[in-house]
Image: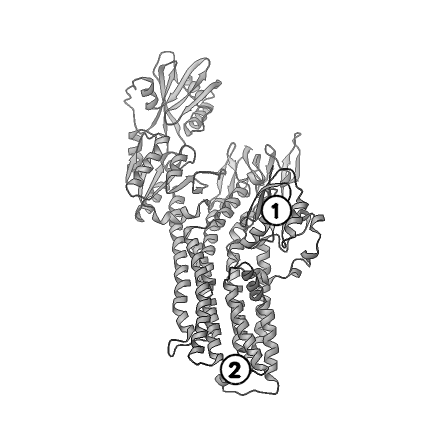
Amino acid sequence: MTHTYSISGMTCDHCVAKVQKALEAVQGIQSVQVSLDPPQAVVTMHHHVTVEGLNAAVASVGDYALATVKGAVSGTKDHLAELTEHGHEAAISDENHQGMDHSKMDHATTDHSKMDHSGHGNHGDHHRMMIEDFKRRFWVSLILMLPVLILAPMIQNFLGISWTFAGDRYLQFVLSSIIYFYGGWPFLKGLKEELGKRAPGMMTLIAIAISAAYIYSSAVVFGLEGKTFFWELASLIVVMLLGHWIEMRSVLGASKALEALAALMPNDATRIDENGQANKVSISELRTGDLILIKPGEKVPADGVIKEGSSSLNESMLTGESVPVSKSEGVEVIGGSINGSGAIKVQVKGVGEDSYLAKVVKLVQDAQGQKSKTQHLADRAAKWLTVIALVAGFGTFAVWMFMGKELAFALERMVTVMVICCPHALGLAIPLVAAISTSVSAKHGLLIRNRTAFENSRKITTIVFDKTGTLTKGSHEVTRVVPLAEGWDEAKILRYATAVESSSEHHISKGLQRRAKADGLEIPTSKDFKYEAGVGVSGTVESKAVRAGGYLMLEAAGITAPDDSDDGVETKIFLVIDDRLVGFVTFADQIRESSAGAIDTLQKNGIKCLLLTGDNERVAASVAKELGMDDYLAEVLPDQKQDKIKELQAAGEFVAMTGDGVNDAPALARADVGIAIGSGTDVAAETADIVLVDSDPKDIANLILFGKATYRKMIQNLWWATGYNAVALPLATGFVPGLVISPAFGAALMSISTVICAVNAQLLKRELK
């Protein structure tokens, strides 16, 4: 048996390893897979193990707690662990968590699922607590820093004043000690955690720098000959706290779009019982098949299909469509959208983790948890920068001491180098851009499943469009019904064609059903249904062998296609009864209003646009010409589409494929970037890298341009983070004559670099129109 549990308290990969090891040691556990984003454990058991037993195991290795995943959207808010540098959690003491001392709790007898984990169970709330903690530490340290600055000899000389009194050094020592231990606590605790994991990073560098300055200055106060660094120490800690505070606020902003999605669902719904009575119930009580009433102005509480009534629904927060969408009987509605002026009755289709909203949040979390090649590059660079900082810092100290400089000067240079080289900006450069791009695109109905493919959209040279439902509306309204055999009239042809197509999900089947319903025809039952991709369908209707399909079906059956003087750019389906051609039905499909604009935008950005369709040559040529496409491929069977993609790739093209994710699945998987369009509430298009909720071609253009903008922001941040270090490091060493910077100025530069990366990432929100 396999169970999924959410985990609170994990903040890094080290936590993941500890929790996994603890769970694997529990008797009865067969296998465990623990992830940080989302923070959960998928546990396979030989025999059932209680949640209490699992919690006792994880509590023994840290402040962790498991709870059964119930599939509610409320538990799926954006988790920011990857964006929060190691050591930030050090700012949160045990007392911050609702006053609970986890080390003294009896986890074995505590039901964590019923506990108030508001202090740590949700990473978003935990992150807000950390922001408040850094803010508090910053203001306290800033106030204490002012007298330290005034009493510093260097500052007094700069201001042309002389304020000294007996014991002023001891006052500086006391104030600086408070700043060091209180303001510097997050960095000191981070040092311990990073060294414990044998992964020195930003916290290690800052902690070594402030500790060296504090210990040396304290020794000078109590007798060692030299000068103190108290004002540099205080200003360094204050600047670092300010930088972290601002940066963490920017990081939190990356989660707001996703949190807004999670907050869309109402708390209750009006369910209609078997007696037709309306009752208010919690949305957790809704089940598939329930009938619910949605009054004007109310939020839709679950995915479903309208059974009675019509209205306009606002889906802007779900799909990015700003104009309310008119919907009537038989049309799907999405949970979280807002009903307009009409009252509608809806049959529930998706609840809990099967709902559109839950799937979207899960997709976004999975995408944010992925690391693209660009991000792996940044991670490696950050690790090397830490090594360089440590080597350069101690090396600078050694060189200046060897050259006969005083200890104070050498120590000051070492501290400045370590602060300058903190890989903070580099560690933030990619993850924050990734989080913002994923959550913002989800808000506009663009769902990223594969981050690397999304970033690779900048490389696209050719985009292949499926015609039906992508560039055209896929409406396939019946235009002509033409009998070809004696005893067959239009009504009879429609009855048999609709019957044999009734088990198909194709647009043609839906078009036939609409026409048959409009004509008031009674449709017979079809049996033995078979579907041959790109050819047609077959079955048994009223004891007759019935086949319906295009020219390829006639060719396979050895039947000559009839002459048709009215043949235009229509889709034509032939009806064959007991191996005899009895007639055909033609369909017209309208081109979407936004198709031409999308094609034009892509071509202006240097991307060739090709049409790939199973339709006949005449239809394909007409659509391609009307939209100004570069080329078209007609009468291509679904299993041949991936071969066409291969041919383009072999010719050196970087290919994107757009399709419906069903017939086009092999081609979507084969393409360098697969885009499933028009998924509606079905966002689990497994073969696609990117899923578009609406069937709007302009979303494809927006997506590709947004992918380019995202990659551009990542590169900008990487250049800024690394370029800043390349310029500032030589100045920090003091080896450049006449250009020497202080530790405090170095800290300011480092913090400014980090904040610039954070602000630049936030500007990405403007790129998606």
Q: Position of residue 407 (x, y in %)?
A: 49, 79
Q: Nearer the viewer, mark 1 or mark 2?
A: 1
Distance in Å between CA atoms under marks 1 and 2: 53 Å
What amino acid is labelled 1 in the image? Leu
Mark 1 and mark 2 lie on one chain; the one further toward the N terminus is 1
Query: Of the numbered discs in the image, which one, if any, rests on residue 23?
Result: 1
The residue located at (38%, 48%) in the rendering is: 456
* Relative depth, front residue between 44 and 448: 44
Q: Position of residue 548 (x, y in %)?
A: 39, 21
Depicted 488 relative to depicted 152: above or below: above
Q: Quadrant of the N terminus?
A: top right
Depicted 277 relative to depicted 113: above or below: above
Residues at badges 1 and 2 in contact (C-beta under 8 Å)?
A: no
Furthest-front residue in this view: 402
> By what rule are the colours in the image chosen?
one colour
SS at badge 1: helix
Q: Position of residue 711 (x, y in %)?
A: 39, 53
* Relative depth, front residue between 417 and 592: 417
Q: Give the image quarter of residue 731.
A: bottom left
Residue 752 in view? no
Residue 50 in view? yes
Q: Is residue 298 rendered to the left or right of residue 652?
A: right
SS at badge 2: loop
> How many residues crowd around disc 2 within 10 Å: few (fewer than 14), some, or many (20 or more)?
some
* Relative depth, front residue between 502 and 328: 502
Disc 2: which residue: 227
Q: Position of residue 452 (x, y in %)?
A: 41, 48
What amino acid is labelled 2 in the image? Lys
Q: Is residue 326 rendered to the left or right of residue 58?
A: left
